[in-house]
Image (tube, grey):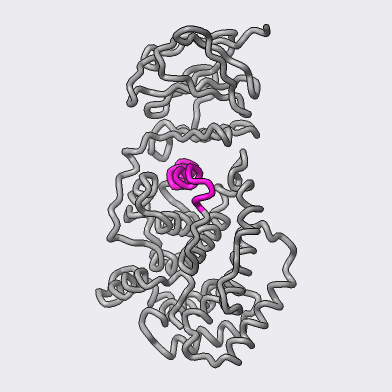
Amino acid sequence: DAPKLLLSAQRMKRLDRDRTRQTERWQNLQDRVSTVTDSPERGMELALTAAVSNNPELADQAIRWARQHPEEARQVALVVDWCGGKLTRAQRDEILGAAWRAYQKRADGEIDPVRYRDGLLLRAEREQEFPDVSRWWNAILPHLKSRDRNWLTDPAQLYALCEILDAVRQNSRDDPRTDDGPLFQQLPMEYLLSLHPREVESPTWQTRAAALALVAIDPNLAGAQFLQGWVLEDPQVMRTGPGVAYEFLWANPYLPGISYYNLDPWSYDRDASLLYARTSWEPDACWIRITVGGVSEQNCPADWKAKPFTAGRLTLLPFSKGCVDLPAEATETSARSPSTILWGLAPQTRLSYKGEKKPIYSNADAAGMFLAPNNGEKIICVATAK
């Protein structure tokens, strides 16, 4: 059967074009396969090169590697899927059975995207129908929507999630992202803003691999086009190391990208009580993250919390009194007017401001932040008890 894991027909067509044109990414992968025999991604590298070049010798090497490394569940599944034409049914069952037994011995942690991804890809090769992921998805979705989003700062978890989404969409008519459209529409931009200033300049290969896969999941999203603008930058291209195969597999230079320098450098999710903001895209920029767990910062002046903080078109205004006067520009009613977020409030503080006929009441989020309305109102106060 044709590969059903990660190598869709459209993706294979692009990779074959890279091979024909002998692009730098293809040559880097070939160099790594021929010189780094002890690579931790050896099974994937051999199988990917074999599948794109239709090289039976490399396919044999990949299969031998899979036999010798049953503990590498994900890579074994990819080898069997991409090089399965050279295996009999009995050989497939033998290799996959050994990997499944090794997988089941691992510590429990089914909600972890990395562990679940490994098991899902194995099951996809062992079972005649693609596994139903709905039960796991219903369990993991609250974690993805959580108020700390710690998984967002772990590129291994984000990358595994992307592989799950790609495999599900490729092998079923389902797209789990529809269960929370706003979360996944925001995700590419939020991921870029979550990177520390130095990470933007010098990302790890895992960080970059996650970004490449995230763009590939839905390149039409506005945030994905800014993320694509970042991954297209030449200094970050992975030319050596374990990330070479991921660079070749996911990077699509034929997609348009928008310079991330044009992205307003802040992101706020009220439901998650999560804010990312930075003063610029330079390596020495002040970067902050506010969640229910507190404030994280890098490169910021010691007194930044005591005065208005500006990030692009956002003003972060500390709230220290019963009322606060918004900056004049924050009272504009245009859709393109700057935004103001009050912060430093107690969680869920009740606030009030004038409406056309009567006061309007609203609450700060669980982290003590409140996005001020652009309705012309200048003063926002803590609501007095009735």
Q: Residue furthest front?
A: 357
Picture quarter containing residue 133?
bottom right
Q: Residue at x 60, y 85 (%)?
A: 67
Q: Horizontally, is 140 left or right of 215 in the view?
A: right
Give, as a single range, the part of the protein colored magenta: 177-199
Q: Residue 77: where, in percent of width, then height?
A: 56, 76
Q: Is residue 66 above or below residue 375?
A: below
Between 64 and 176, the residue placed more toward the observer is: 176
Picture quarter containing residue 340?
top left
Tell me if residue 282 can be seen.
yes
Picture quarter containing residue 347?
top right
Magenta highlight on residue 324: no
Q: Residue at x 51, y 83 (%)?
A: 62
Q: Is residue 335 above or below residue 108?
A: above
Q: Horizontally, is 159 left or right of 377 in the view?
A: right
Say which quadrant the C terminus sits in: top right
Q: Residue 97: where, in percent of width, then height?
A: 66, 82
Q: Residue 180: where, in percent of width, then height?
A: 52, 46
Between 304 and 222, the residue placed more toward the observer is: 222
Q: Residue 188: where, in percent of width, then height?
A: 44, 47
Between 274 and 176, the residue placed more toward the observer is: 176
Q: Residue at x 38, y 55 (%)?
A: 236
Magenta stretch, overall SS? helix
Magenta highlight on residue 195: yes
Q: Is residue 236 above or below residue 300?
A: below
Q: Residue at x 58, y 36 (%)?
A: 272
Total marks shown come to 0
Tell me if residue 196 can be seen.
no
Q: Residue furthest left?
A: 21
